[in-house]
Amino acid sequence: MGLRRRMALVVVSVAATPLALAGCTTERKAPVRPAEREAPAPEVTLTPADRSRDVPVSAEVTAQVTGGKVVAVRIADDNGMLVRAERREDGSAWVPTVALRPRSTYTVEAVAVGDSGRTTTRTTTFTTMPTSTKPQVTSTLYVADGRTYGTAMPVTIGFDPPVARAARADVQRRLFVTTDPPQPGAWSWLDDGSQVYYRAPDFWRPGTTISVRAALEGLPIGENLTGDADRTATSRIGRQVALEVDNATKQMRVLRDGKVIRRIPVSLGKPSTPTSSGKMVIMEKHQRTTFDTRGEPNGGYVVDVADAQRLTWGGEFIHAAPWSVSDQGHRNVSHGCTNISPANADWLMTVTQIGDLVTFTGTEVRLQAGNGWTAWNTSWEQFVKGSALPVSAGPRPAPPATPRPGADGSPTSGPARSVG
């Protein structure tokens, strides 16, 4: 298959046996060194095993070696075309960069070198399964290719239906994140399995490039489900911006690179529909949208709003509210949203970006896990406990170079729902 087996030449050395006389004594012979034994070649076991059938299209190639190490792996399809694959960081497997094709035959050739220099080449051929007829788990990657996000942007993947606890480790092994410059990070699941987040111990450094791959196409998820797609995205982290909202003062502080650049009066949720306290992340931005709460508790209204920025799945937004300007900075009158004046809302849209952190304090209720991208609403020590795989010990969070996260901002479009 294009790789030639090489045999190491082992030189056998035999010592000469000269005759020596010592006075009139008997003959003495020098000891003979035993011939050097030939070092064994490394042993290689490949997976998938040779002639395997019905292999999932999410298959990875593993090469277990005794007495040496793998130096080359070559994967080719049934047309002889090479399949690109990347080695896992721990060296345990080679992962094809795209899902394999159903009902196709692949050949793997691996070369291992032993400590003595001898090599072993092993080949395996396997056939993938037909397209699965099992129901799929629909995955949603909330990071888009080519976008710029705030420094609090967690890599978020949603699942419908949620992933059962027993299947989460298999799913998590197929989720890959790389950052440039490198930063440590970890995955953490919501208890119900509907979302998984990836974040660093501290906020992303401005200028970081984040590349994500959710390689779930054809992945068996439990006994009765499969993954739906192979999704990838590469995005960038912008400058630092953060919002801090204090219910006690009814004021929002807007910080850029750790410095306050504006204070904005707000009106939050009234006691019957309070705003949540906690660390939120801007999820969507709409220059104009319609809130339709008919059929929802404490809702029943339809209203058009401008400059709306989503913070939770439950419908908490920051938005322009010309009807409550006189209340802003004094009392809470909304249905859970953060009301600000049209002028301030218009200005704020030019400053913020999806992925900026928004922190609320002093309201009547706490933010619920999973109601939005709530990855920052817990400590790093608690966050890593949500991983389905062991998390290697890494650096503890340190104070960032600039005190607050955030990024540049530009409006986006999309559907919106709100409770007020």
Image (tube, helix red, strand yellow):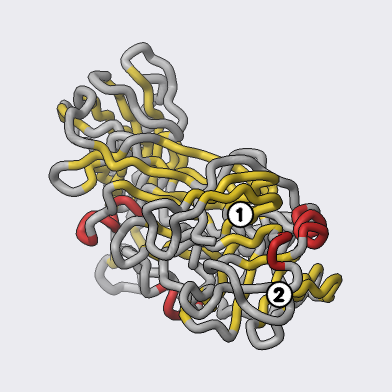
187 vs 371, nearest the viewer: 371
Q: Residue at x 32, y 51 (%)?
A: 171
Mark 2 lies on a secondary structure that is loop
Select label 1 or label 2 by which is in front: 2
Residue 349: percent from left, percent from top: 75, 54
Residue 121: percent from left, percent from top: 32, 33
Q: Is residue 232 above or below residue 13?
A: above
Residue 71 visible to an observer of this rendering: yes
Q: Residue at x 18, y 28 (%)?
A: 133
Circle 1: residue type = Thr
Q: Which residue is mark 1?
A: 179
**Mark sitting on residue 83:** none
Q: Residue at x 54, y 76 (%)?
A: 270
Q: Which residue is mark 2?
A: 327
70 vs 318, nearest the viewer: 318
Other residues around mark 1 within 10 Å, as few (<14) / some (14–19) / many (≥20): some
Mark 1 lies on a secondary structure that is strand
Other residues around mark 2 within 10 Å, as few (<14) / some (14–19) / many (≥20): some
186 vs 47, nearest the viewer: 186
Left or right of 336 on screen, residue 387: left
Circle 2: residue type = Asp
